[in-house]
Image (spheres, helix red, strand yellow):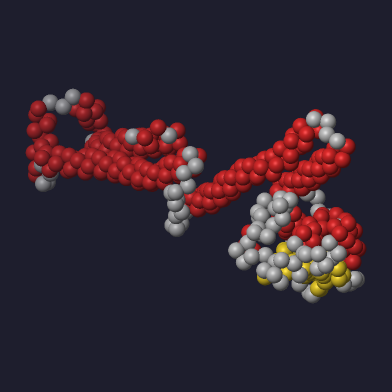
Amino acid sequence: MGIFRNPEVKRLYRILGLLAALFLFMAYLLSQWGVHLFRDSITNNIAAAVGALAEKYPDAEADIMAQLRQADAASIQAGQALLNRYGYSTQNILHEIEGIKSTFNFNTFLFMLLSGSICLALSAVFFYFLARQYRRINEVTDYAKLVQAQDYSLDIRDNSEGDISMLKNEIYKITTMLREQAESLRKEKLGLSNSIADISHQLKTPLTSLFVLNDLLAGDPDPAAKEEFFRRINSQLERMQWLVSSLLKLSKLDAGTAAMKRERVSARKLAERALETLKVQLEQKEIQVINDYSDMEFTADFNWTLEAVTNILKNCAEHTPKGGRISISYESNPIYDAIIISDNGVGIDKEDLPHIFQRFYKGRNASEDSVGIGLAMAKAIVNEQNGDISIKSRPGQGTTFTLKFFK
């Protein structure tokens, strides 16, 4: 049987075999001891009779001993007659001796049988216990093989008591964690594949434009056309530089390697720096900026938060018509500090709102040059700092972004 191939079981049954042999040897010693007592009893009785005769008849001591060494028929008959006269027949004495012997032999046999039965019973109990335990261990082994083959369908949880039940439950917990990690890894691989495809698509457009412009420049156009071509080339290169830089930053955020400082940030300075970056774009569209120059401070990383706020302001500027308005306000309460950025632009369609922070997502009102990465980066930066971004928008009435940094 399979259970006996286990070294531990073999060692256990060797010990049981030694115990059984010890019991049998003890039974043998007990039987020999009983025979010795039986012989001593007979010898003592004969010695008592001889001693009494020798004491009674000291002159006949030599004849008594001689007769003891070699009894003749006449003396045996005389002795039997004497025993009969006092009610002791040869059959009675032999029967009593045989009875004692039979009783002792039976007790010895019973002891040996009982010892053997106990050993067999213990062996059977141990076998049942070990077979049951190893059957449960084999279940765990088979389950581990299934998990190794990435089959997580079997539920091995056990509500009974015992160490093996605890082991099953702990292994199931580990399996659940492995299943979740495998699912997360699968989603990450899928997301990486989609991201690579999106990046390739985003880079393909400016690269194609650069190849076309390069071919046009090779034709030696007039100076005015050449200047326009160089301007377009510079624009495409700046777009590619921004895209690559943004993707590198997003990669750091995804990998968890972006070092976020914990420092006190002035909301006023943060807004001023972000608006300074977009100064040219805001002036070209004559957009009015209403900034509540609050003295509010909150804990965050200044540079990364500046990147998030700049991307949101850039999105507002792109979707606000000429002569529009962008307002920046602040809110602080015991739970969080918030930066609220609003515009009166074209707004966002209801169908686009759930996806507006998805990477490379472009809504219906997105501009042609939009990549769909700025808002995704802003949300990743704020989330990395124990914060959140919410959005409210209605088509034709503008959009409001709320950046919350929880205390």
- The foreground one among 387 and 313 is 313
- The foreground one among 287 and 191 is 287
The residue depicted at 16 percent of the width and 27 percent of the height is 71
- The foreground one among 143 and 293 is 293
**Residue 259, image x and y in percent?**
80, 50
Determine the image quadrant of residue 402: bottom right
Specify the quadrant that holds the C terminus: bottom right
Q: Is residue 321 left or right of residue 146?
A: right
The residue depicted at 18 percent of the width and 24 percent of the height is 70
The residue depicted at 25 percent of the width and 40 percent of the height is 109
Asked if 211 appears above or below 402 in the picture, the reply is: above
Determine the image quadrant of residue 67: top left
**Residue 313, image x and y in percent?**
80, 61
Can residue 7 be seen by looking at this rendering?
Answer: yes
- The foreground one among 295 and 164 is 295
**Residue 312, image x and y in percent?**
77, 60
Determine the image quadrant of residue 22: top left
Can residue 407 be seen by looking at this rendering?
Answer: no
Asked if 153 appears above or below 321 in the picture, the reply is: above
